Structures are given as C-alpha cells and as structure tokens.
Amino acid sequence: MRTSYDACIALSLSLLSHVCRAEYDCFQIELSKNYGVQEWRDDVKSVLLKSGLECNQMVFLFSDTQVGG
C-alpha cells in the first residue's frame, strides 16, 4: 500500500528526472472541480500534437492521487 509520502517521493523523483533531462518538455495536468472528460481529452490532444507534429519530446506527468476510481 502506497502512502501519500511515497507518492510525493515518486512525483519528486519524476520531476528531478525531468529537470536532469532538460531536453524534455514537461506537461502536468491541473485538476479542478470542473475538470472532466472533455478537459482530459483536450490535454491529451495537446500533448500528442506537441510530441507528434512538432516533434517535441514530452513528459506527461500526473500522480496517482489525480486518477479517479
């Protein structure tokens, strides 16, 4: 069972890895009360366009606490 402390460490390590590999752009979703399926699709579309059409190397970062069940 993961604790919020473990999740925080994992997120910190992901961010540190991103910073060490400065050639990657980092995209992190920002959840709000109104964030829904359409916003998720728009975010994924944006990342795919940037990485595919513009040939940007991307990191799509979100934590396990941002995933609803």
Image (cartoon, grey):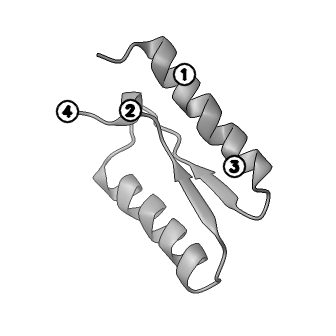
Q: Earlier in the sequence, mark 3 or mark 2?
A: 3
Instruction: Say which amino acid is labelled 3.
Output: His
Image x and y of residue 25, in percent: 69, 60
Secondary structure beneath dot 3 equals helix
Q: Identify the residue under disc 2.
A: 64
In the shown orientation, is residue 11 left or right of residue 57? left
Q: Earlier in the sequence, mark 1 or mark 4?
A: 1
In the shown orientation, is residue 29 left or right of residue 33? right
Q: Earlier in the sequence, mark 4 or mark 3?
A: 3
Q: Identify the residue under disc 3.
A: 18
- Cα–Cα span, label 3 and label 1: 15 Å
Secondary structure beneath dot 2 equals helix
Q: Identify the residue under disc 1.
A: 8
Callout 3: 10 Å neighbours few (<14), some, many (20+)?
A: some
- Cα–Cα span, label 1 and label 4: 19 Å
Residue for point 66% across, 75% down: 56
User: Is 63 above or below relative to 42?
Assistant: above
Secondary structure beneath dot 1 equals helix
Secondary structure beneath dot 4 equals loop
In the shown orientation, is residue 9 left or right of residue 39? right
Callout 1: 10 Å neighbours few (<14), some, many (20+)?
A: some
Residue for point 52% across, 68% down: 46
Image x and y of residue 30, in percent: 53, 40
- Cα–Cα span, label 4 and label 3: 27 Å
Name the outermost residue toward the bottom.
53
Instruction: Say which amino acid is labelled 1.
Output: Cys
User: Is 52 above or below relative to 57?
Assistant: below
- Cα–Cα span, label 3 and label 2: 18 Å
User: Is 55 above or below relative to 23?
Assistant: below
Q: Nearer the viewer, residue 34 or 24?
A: 24
Instruction: Say which amino acid is labelled 2.
Output: Asp
Q: Identify the residue under disc 4.
A: 69
